[in-house]
Image (cartoon, coloured by chain):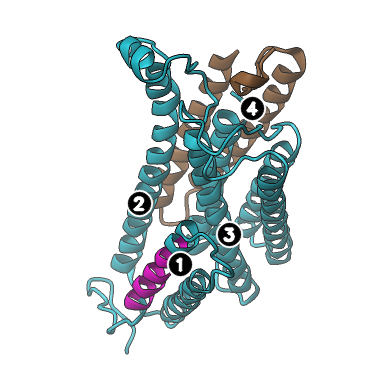
Amino acid sequence: MKIVIILMLLFILFSLGSAMFYLVKGQGKSQNTVRFLTVRVVLSVLLFLFIILAAHMGWIETQQPAFLRP
Amino acid sequence: MSEASKDQYYVPHLAKWPIVGSVGLTVTVLGAINLLNSENPGTPWMLYLGFAIILLMMFGWFGEVIKESEDNLYNTQVDTSFRMGMIWFIFSEVMFFGAFFGALFYARTFSVPWLGGEGTGLSTNEVLWNGYEGVWPTNGPGDLGGRFELIDPYHLPLINTLLLLASSVTITIAHHALRANNRSQTIIWLIATVILGAVFLFYQAEEYIEAYRDLNLTLSSGIYGSTFFMLTGFHGMHVTLGAIMITIITIRVIRGHFRPESHFGFEAVAWYWHFVDVVWLGLFIFVYIL
């Protein structure tokens, strides 16, 4: 399940990077920056929901110091 | 100064703000060093003074640039140079967080397992750190700072993730509203973003208090404590900076500085806020959960 989280993070980084590209390139007329930023937010919310689900279902384990492990 | 033409590069007058910023940063760093290295630091006045000088520089410098922009001193060449400036600024930010995330990943994946005897570290473990189990999270074989507990990621960090995600949603709504030339909606959602950012910072401070008081998790808790506080602390400073910038952008929207087809200042700050939120997602996942 970790791979799903990593892949979603990569997609988020890609949309953030694309928004940056159009921010620097565009002259404010293009809708691309705001579009990619919107995609970025939607993906982040989905990732957040997935993490909650994964934790609830026991798909991912939370880290613990060695002396607290069972 | 008269209005600049399209092909003529606007050369700014002699600016005092870069040297004010340098002095502010130096005083801040000296104050931080003093705070971290003295046995009984007391009130860190030098650190506060440094922050105050940096704030003064931000308001002064932002104010001058905004005034020059509103006076139509900037042409397309200056516009391009602002965009290039944004690229280099973000490049330095990515490198900055890359270094701290890199330190975290390197310690977790390589150095801590080596000290525990994995790979080529077998003799290191047997001779130097016999009995040390190289498992993350750890304060290292020297047990620096003593035993510590971790912050429950599904309590304050979860709330903070929700707050910051919500603030990204609100700034995106503001962004769409600005493009639709709806100024009142833009202002409302920008104010909501600043409030959400401020509440995030409040809970972050709560979390630090809890870590120091109840969990014995401090900056001295070995490699875990250092990476944890450096990453989350510098992120918190970025949220602070972002919130200040959004506040200034909100004032500019109130004064009618931006147009649907021309609002680079707004877009750059909005992008920065998204960047800070993505860094937090990385922290939430790699520092708190996995």
Calculate the distance from the C-alpha at mark 4 to the C-alpha at mark 1. 39 Å
> In the image, is residue B289 above or below residue B271?
above
User: Which structural element holds mark 1?
Assistant: helix
Label 1 lies in what chain?
B
The foreground one among B169 and B237 is B237
Residues in magenta, as a range? B18-32
Calculate the distance from the C-alpha at mark 3 to the C-alpha at mark 4. 25 Å
Calculate the distance from the C-alpha at mark 2 to the C-alpha at mark 3. 21 Å
B30 drawn magenta = yes
Residue bearing mark 3: B240
Residue bearing mark 1: B31
Let me know if residue B271 appears in the view: no
Q: Give, as a three-letter code, the residue at label 2.
A: Ile
Badge 1: residue crowd in 10 Å (few <14, some 14–19, many ≥20): some
Mark 2 vs mark 3: give the one in front.
3
Badge 4: residue crowd in 10 Å (few <14, some 14–19, many ≥20): many
Badge 3: residue crowd in 10 Å (few <14, some 14–19, many ≥20): some
Q: Is residue B290 left or right of residue B14?
A: right
At x 55%, y 73%, the residue is B257
Residue bearing mark 4: A47
Dot 4 and dot 2 within a common chain: no
Q: Give, as a three-letter code, the residue at label 1.
A: Gly
Q: Quadrant of residue A42?
A: top right
The foreground one among B233 and B284 is B233
Residue bearing mark 2: B87
- Percent x, y of residue A12: 53, 32
